[in-house]
Image (tube, rainbow, N blue to C red):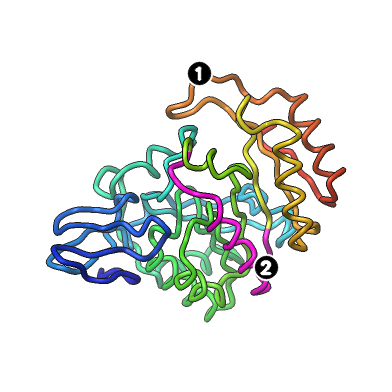
Amino acid sequence: MEARFYIETEGGVQCLLCPHHCRIKDGGRGICRSRECRGGKLYALSYGMPCAVAIDPVEKKPLNRFMPGTDCLSLSCTGCNLSCRWCQNSSISQVAPEEAESSFLSPEEIVDICLRRGLPSIAYTYTEPFTWWEYMYDIAVSAHRKGLKNILVSAGYVEKAPLEELLPFLDAANIDIKAMDDSFYRKYCGASLGPVLDTIIAMKDAGVHVEITNLLVTGLNDSQEQVTRLCKWMVENGLQDVPLHLSRFFPRYRMRDLEPTPRKALISTKEAAHAAGIKTVYLGNI
């Protein structure tokens, strides 16, 4: 399927879906591996090809204050526009569509599965849903027509135009802030912080239920100071009522040499978050 949000350039295209603005020559792909230039057009390779479909408790997203006690239909296609060294889903996020098992399911079939199972919501999760924006968008529109809720689990690294087009069909989101440190993003995730913060503010202003996750990576961003910086930004932007999930790190992918986050670090950062003005703080992966 032809992708959205790109312009033609000499010898290829420039993708405008996320802040990377990948310049892609004919036959090449962007950082996310799932958008390819062919004959001067950009194509969304993973459209309709989910590599994971499951039923999860909504609390697993994690969303603790949105339709608690219900299950959601979770789905994912391959692809991510970040390259976090600790990714727990690297087998599907850091690969091209042809490198993972998948089968075709149209947006209408996804919605039908949800309805037949009696599930009230659909979650776009596991990888980075914005890299398969077209598929997510078509499902979300169809889901709203049938009275279903849409949940986004994302790193929030997206441009303004695709985000604004999706927002009317988005009911809840959990956005993962890696750290309140742009150099951390660039070194460990291959991205930048600013667009993520802009995404969260835009969602808040649009009335989307937002919860935030911060994975505390041992020795890198698990200090009280780091978490306090995040919480102060939340308070300054009217997000003190947004639930904050502080999650425990476990060795994964390219970062297997670190120990799991010490429990004392989790407890101390939770206390720091409360002291900074965040009303609801959860500890995850414990």
Q: Quadrant of residue 120?
A: bottom right
Where residue 24 sits: x, y (%)? 23, 57
Work out whether residue 248 or residue 9 is closer to the camera in this orientation and state it. Answer: 9
Where residue 81 sits: x, y (%)? 40, 50
Q: Residue drawn 47% across and 41% down?
A: 186
Against 224, is 282 above or below? below
Q: Which residues are magenta?
A: 189-210
Give left or right: position of 62 versus 35. Answer: right
- Badge 1 marks a residue whose secondary structure is loop
**Which mark is drawn over residue 257?**
1
Against 278, is 172 above or below? below
Disc 2 marks a residue whose amino acid type is Lys
Q: CA distance from mark 2 to mark 1?
A: 37 Å
Give left or right: position of 142 versus 5. Answer: right
- Badge 2 marks a residue whose secondary structure is helix
Work out whether residue 99 or residue 233 is closer to the camera in this orientation and state it. Answer: 233
Q: Residue drawn 40% across and 68% down?
A: 109
**Which mark is drawn over residue 213?**
none
Reply yes or no: does residue 161 show up in magenta: no
Q: Quadrant of the C terminus?
A: top right
Where residue 157 sits: x, y (%)? 49, 56
Query: Mark 2 sits on what residue?
Result: 204
Disc 1 marks a residue whose amino acid type is Asp
Against 5, is 61 above or below? above
